[in-house]
Amino acid sequence: LRMALHKRARARAHLLGGALFFGMRSCEYTYVGSRDRKTRPIEIRDITFWAGNRVLPHSHPLLQYADSVTINFGDQKSDIRNEQVTQYNNGDEELNPVFNWATTIRRLLSYPGVRDDWPVFTYFDGQQFSKITSTEVIDDIRSAVASI
């Protein structure tokens, strides 16, 4: 996250930081191509934030402080359907599943015409929409490892 110097790089860093805690495949949180796939990418509506047993709306001003975040993984290539996985807020300022997914949701909600069925890899630069790709994220990972 510290290496992310521009908005798109920060968006990728938050996606990767959130995906890490859920052990996500790249096709679940980045665009990997248009061919038919059994695994459906995560969409805005698949992400739920919790304060205790209460669901927090995506518009909640303190979303990043939720107790936990749950992701519904929909259809998977393993034939498991609608598996829900929860991760808890660990209090870390950067490597925290709640913080990273809250930041991603806020980014998406700031886009014009946003819908809850948009994949989390949707990106808007102020002029046009694009998709954050798995190739971009792989390059980010390689750069981070090389800097160690």
Image (cartoon, rainbow, N blue to C red):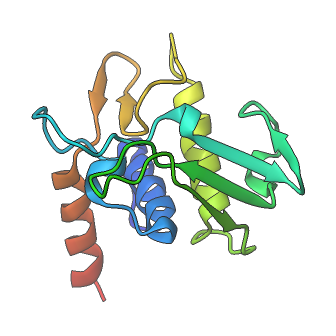
In the rendered image, the vertical position of residue 120 relative to residue 84, given as above or below: above
Furthest toward the bottom, the residue is 148
Horizontally, is 101 left or right of 123 in the view?
right
Residue 112 at x, y percent in the picture: 51, 13
Q: Quadrant of residue 48?
A: top right
State whether residue 14 is above or below residue 108.
below
Name the spot of residue 11 as percent of width and height, x first. 43, 47
Left or right of 20, for residue 31 = left
Query: Can residue 4 be seen here?
Result: yes
The answer to whether 91 is drawn above or below residue 79 in the figure is below
Q: Residue at x 39, y 26 (%)?
A: 124
Q: Quick check: can you spot residue 1? A: no
Can you say which quadrant of the picture contains the C terminus? bottom left
Place residue 118 in its image quadrant: top left
Of 27 and 7, nearer the camera is 27
Q: Count the marks: how many?
A: 0
The spot of residue 7 in percent (x, y) is 42, 43
Q: Is 35 on the left-hand or right-hand side of 140?
A: left
Q: Nearer the viewer, residue 143 or 63?
A: 63
Residue 126, placed above or below residue 21 = above
Residue at screen point 83% across, 46% down: 62
Which residue in the rendered view is the most extreme toward the front? Answer: 79
How far across and how far down the image is residue 76, in percent?
Answer: 34, 50
| Residue ID at (40%, 59%) | 4
Describe residue 10's horizontal placement relative to residue 148 as left or right: right
Farthest residue to the top: give it. 113
29 and 96: which is toward the camera: 29
Q: Which residue shows up at 54% across the image and 24% down it?
A: 116
